[in-house]
Amino acid sequence: MQINDKVENFTLQNQDGETVNLTDFSDKPVVLFFYPRANTSGCTIEACGFRDAFQKLQQAGVVVLGISRDDVKAQKNFHRKYNLPYNLLADPDMTLINRYDLLRPKSMYGKLVKGVERTTFIISPDTGSGQRLVHIFPKVNPENHVEEVLAVLHLTPAHA
């Protein structure tokens, strides 16, 4: 995926088992953040960062969608446990994760394993030529990621 590429529609289930399509939000900017695993420390920091900034994002008309390879039940637990106000999408077959080429080799306890690379995409509203990719945050650091997203969306105070 490259900047300005048209983003294909996708369909996944949210934490409640409801079907969500990217085109459901064709009139709004979408923050699509991929995270490795629900209820892990880095993923919790990232998800709660979006939770804490959600009102500001929502007021600006921005849709937030979190995606991992967890199943619906795990997403529901994570969603409930941290009171997340946005949809978490389940991609247990890794259809979208593979489409976005996010399965990467990682070192875990000295062993090489494949895992989801924490990455965020900002997708534009459809202005007649489809929803387009406008920004990519690769290899996200969950600690300050929301501030980076807010800055790209021009939602930070002028003095920040």
Image (spheres, helix red, strand yellow):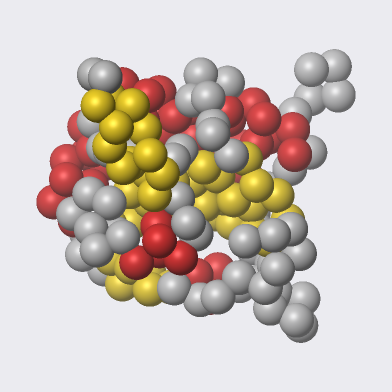
For the C terminus, the quadrant is top right
53 left or right of 4?
A: left
- Which residue is nearer to you in this view: 43 or 87? 43
Does residue 84 show up? no
Side of 2 where 105 appears, left or right: left
- State the image quarter where residue 10 is shown: bottom left
- Between residue 39 and residue 4, name the one nearer to us: 4
Residue 77 is situated, as x and y percent measured from the top left of the image, at 17, 41
Above or below, 9 relative to 39: below
Q: Residue at x 48, y 46 (%)?
A: 33
Report the residue at 85% width, 16% height from top.
159
- In this rendering, the count of numbered labels is 0
Residue furthest toward the left? 73
> Which residue is rendered at x = 76% and y = 64% of the image?
4
Residue at (61, 70) in percent of width and height: 7
Q: Residue furthest front?
A: 111
Q: Residue furthest bottom?
A: 128
Please determine whether, in this image, residue 90 is positioned above or below residue 39. below
Residue nearest the observer in this picture, 135 or 55? 135
Measuring from the top left, give residue 144's x and y in whole percent.
58, 21
- Image vertical order of residue 16 relative to residue 105, above or below: below
Q: Quadrant of the N terminus?
A: bottom right
Residue 92 visible (yes or no) = yes
**Is residue 88 rendered to the left or right of residue 100?**
left
In percent of width and height, residue 25 lies at: 55, 68
**49 vs 93, nearest the viewer:** 93
Q: Position of residue 146 (x, y in %)?
A: 58, 30
Q: Is residue 99 left or right of residue 79?
A: right
